[in-house]
Amino acid sequence: MSYLLEADGLAKHYGSVIALDGVSFSIGKGVTGLLGPNGAGKSTAIKLFLGLIKPTSGSAQALGELPYESIEVRSRLGYMPEHDCLPTSLTATEFLVHMAQVSGLPPAHARTRAADTLRHVGLDEERYRAIGEYSTGMKQRVKLAQALVHDPVMVFLDEPTAGLDPMGREEMLALVRRTGGEFGISIMLSSHLMGDVESVCERIVVLEGGQVVEDGQVSQLTRETETLYVEVDDRRDELLDLLRQRGLDTGLDGLSIVIDNVADEGYDTVRDAVVESGARLRRMAPQRHRLTDIFRR
Amino acid sequence: MAAQPRGEIYDIGYRRYEGPREGRNRARAALWINGVRTALGIGRGTLAKILPILLFASTMLPAVIFVFIAYFTEGFGLSDTVDVPSYPDYFGVVSILALLFSAIIAPELLCADRRSQVLQLYLVRPLTSTDYVAGRWLAFFTIALGLVYSGQVVMFFGYTLAAAAPLDYLRDNWLAVPRFLAAGAVVAAFITTIPLTVAGFTTRRAYAAGFVIGLFVISSSIAQTLVGGTGEWLRWVALLDLLSVPTHITDMIFDQVSESGVAQQVSQLNSFIPIAWYLALTAGSAGLLLWRYRQEGQ
């Protein structure tokens, strides 16, 4: 498999501060989350892959090239920064046409791409208004559009839902999913919001203190555990006693009965105990790992 | 009744871009064109255009007045008694206006991008910080060249047509053309570089304009006051007049010395010194601006 991004022993030091400490990972096609608390090294990693800064040691390859040495590769990369980066006096159309040209597209193609891209991010008639008049959600769409206008192979999205209300956040995440799916543009989404990453990404790389602390498929990291949660409407104590009598490792978590280390046959035991106790079963489900657990370890 | 023609709109979905990618050279060209348009207020509201038009008109005015002087002098047979202003005289008169023009307009090219943080979007594209600075510098240099050349072209054609024998005038004065082309480039490079360098250190255009105007007015006032005295050291003090730095070079190009006290003092120095001073200020400022933007890209 050919990778789009490859970090090999990648380190970046700012004086005595170690932003990245010799990390190695590879990113293929699809939507990948770059997760970590503030100061974990996410922004440094993105800057290195965009070729904005030079590694202290190791290498950061983007699309098989070293972007610090070969800046032409940036014409096939896109970047949506977290904070404001839009000129307020221009219309979205003017701005996008210019950004497309600065990415290397000839003027006629730039105009077509700007119109298409603004339509895809959901800005139609508004695109002829000055950006300064836009809402936060519309500005986020323009920021995404400028990252996509030159049809990059890979796009870096830095906190794309920052500052959005719940509805705006859902719309932006849907747009990110569309970009990674329908548009076929691979994404590296940097965020400290677990929910965003969990709902959009297929894979995550977790950074903490400049090191990779987790790297894998989201489905694997959120797989089912061997802990079973049981909720009943009544006779909870009777059920609890029956489960203990049958040798299950049982405890309470709020109103739920928590059964640890449940193997396959354990489900039958729980089912029989519920029937025997006469309790009305409301819910019985295995617990899943959550991405937040990564930081609790 | 004939059926109405009907149209339907289809959503053909996202299409990948298969067209040409012209890379860094297209990016540089786009930056240059955008810079020229921004400085002149093209594609923006009327207000954005008024200031460049007013300043441009004010720099053209001296040239037009000079041509009228030449026309009436020739027409009334006063050519023996009235001195028609020369080409370097134009630079002396217009340098203040050109500096005012560049101090107010040039910072917009850098300040706006840094204020709105658009700069980072440029630097993640196939452009280096040097490309960015060079693109913005070239954009304003183009405008500044147009500004100083326009006045000289008006003067040259005006003087030619005002002359009793235009062809004789052309034969005798053709050398003025390469001279004003060179002198114009010297002035344009200076009035482009200094304001842009100052603009590289602030996000506010007004601060940059105020600083540049203040710097030139104060340095000029100090130098003009001091050169009235006596002593060889005043030749060096005269160099402090930043407003006159390019005109010392234009004087050399036209092989004459302006009548101002500062110009007279500097003319007594080895000609290498004002040239070196001009180059140090211009190239030094440009180097400082490049360094500043390299830091910005990190």
Image (cartoon, coloured by chain):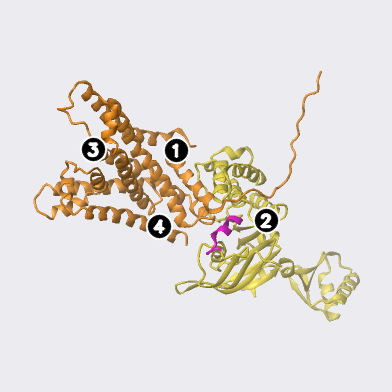
Chain colours: A yellow, B orange
| Vertical position of residue B289 compared to residue A6: above or below | above
x then y, percent, for residue A4:
65, 64
Examine the structure image and report whether residue A71 is included in the region drawn in magenta.
Answer: yes
Q: Residue at x 71, y 66 (%)?
A: A218
Residue on which the image places disc 3: B89
x then y, percent, for residue B210:
31, 46
**Do the residues under discs 4 and 3 have CB atoms within 8 angstroms?**
no
- Which one is closest to the eye, mark 4 or mark 3? 3
The N terminus of chain B: image quadrant? top right
Query: In whole angstroms, how far apart are the C-alphas of marks 4 and 2?
Result: 34 Å
Asked if badges 4 and 3 are on one and the same chain, I answer yes
| Count of picture labels | 4
Residue B41, which numbered label?
Answer: 1
Residue on which the image places disc 4: B290
A136 on left or right of B128 = right
Residue type at numbered disc 2: Ile
Residue type at numbered disc 1: Gly
- Which one is closest to the eye, mark 1 or mark 4? 4
Query: In whole angstroms, how far apart are the C-alphas of marks 4 and 3?
Result: 33 Å
Q: Is residue A50 visible?
A: yes
The residue stretch that appears in magenta: A67-78
x then y, percent, for residue A32:
66, 63
Query: In whole angstroms, how far apart are the C-alphas of marks 2 and 1?
Result: 36 Å
Q: Residues within 10 Å of mark 1 (few under 14, many from 20)?
A: some
Q: Residue at x 79, y 78 (%)?
A: A261
Of marks 4 and 3, which one's residue comes earlier in the chain? Answer: 3
Query: Residue A244 or B168: which is nearer the viewer?
Result: B168
